[in-house]
Amino acid sequence: MGEYSKALSSYEQSLEIRKISLPPNHPDLAASYNGIGAVYYNMGEYSKALASYERSLEIRKIALPPNHPDLAISYNGIGAVYYNVGEYSKALSSYERSLEIRKIALPPNHPDLAGSYNNIGLVYYNMGEYSKALSSYERSLEIQKIALPPNHPNLAASYTNIGSVYDNMGEYSKALSSYERSLEIRKIALPPNHPDLASSYQGIGSVYYNIGEYSKALSHYEKAQEIFQKSLPSNHPHIALVK
């Protein structure tokens, strides 16, 4: 938390200087508000994050062309806040506006487009709209395959998300295949006790549990717990999940 307070202080000092030295709707002011919003977001202070992101957006709407990529960043931040407080329809609206701008402003296989599709997929997944979530996740993965190295961690995250959808739809063989691909990439891309590896083992365990292969489920859950215990604080909820 100390690092966040330092970052916040730095952004706020920068903002005060910019308010004195720049015109009232200068894009650099928007950047300061966006930075402040990001710090509050990471601190879990979502109402303050939202206020900062919205102020950033107001300035950018005045200062920038209507499809400037910085507007997409503001909409994305607003969407992330709404997503984290469970206001999914508002999150979806913001994420879709961000995507619309990025489609116009960026090359067709830019990683930020993959990020937008992934965010939209997350919202649909949490709304229980699994076919829409799957479509968004798969579009994100398609772009990532073109834009990123073959063993980039973001690809693993996409395979995990796709696996989660298939798991919830009861399509267990597809879920298992996706989770295993995620694990393969993470074994190459990440340190051996990275918590994301544990998430992959947990996903595989979940599928085996759901199809009644309990010994395989147990071995994967134990592997997940072993990594979580090495990489996370003892009171972290992920450790309890696999106990």
Image: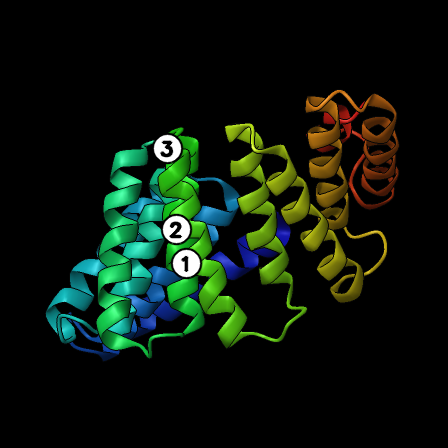
Q: Is residue 19 visible?
A: no
* Quadrant hosting residue 66: bottom left
Query: What quarter of the picture does the C terminus occupy?
Result: top right
Q: Check disc 3 and report its element: helix, strand or loop.
A: loop
- Amino acid type of the residue tagged 2 in the rendering: Ser
* Mark 1 nearby-residue class (10 Å; few <14, some 14–19, many ≥20): some
Residue 147 vs 166, above or below: the answer is: below
Q: Position of residue 138 (x, y in %)?
A: 45, 54
Which one is in front, 234 or 79?
A: 79
Q: Check disc 2 and report its element: helix, strand or loop.
A: helix
Residue drawn at the location 84% of the way across and 51% of the way down? 193
Q: Position of residue 83 (x, y in %)?
A: 38, 39
Residues at discs 2 and 1 in contact (Cβ within 8 Å): yes
Residues at discs 1 and 3 in contact (Cβ within 8 Å): no
- Amino acid type of the residue tagged 1 in the rendering: Arg
Residue under label 1, please give it: 139
Q: Which mark is residue 176?
A: none
Q: CA distance from mark 3 to mark 2?
A: 11 Å
Q: Position of residue 14 (x, y in %)?
A: 39, 70
Q: Which mark is residue 136?
A: 2
Q: Earlier in the sequence, mark 3 or mark 2?
A: 3
Residue under label 3, please give it: 129
Coloring applied to the structure: rainbow
The image shows a total of numbered marks equal to 3
Which one is in front, 183 or 90?
A: 183
Q: Earlier in the sequence, mark 1 or mark 3?
A: 3
Q: CA distance from mark 1 to mark 3?
A: 16 Å
Q: Check disc 1 and report its element: helix, strand or loop.
A: helix
* Quadrant hosting residue 151: bottom right
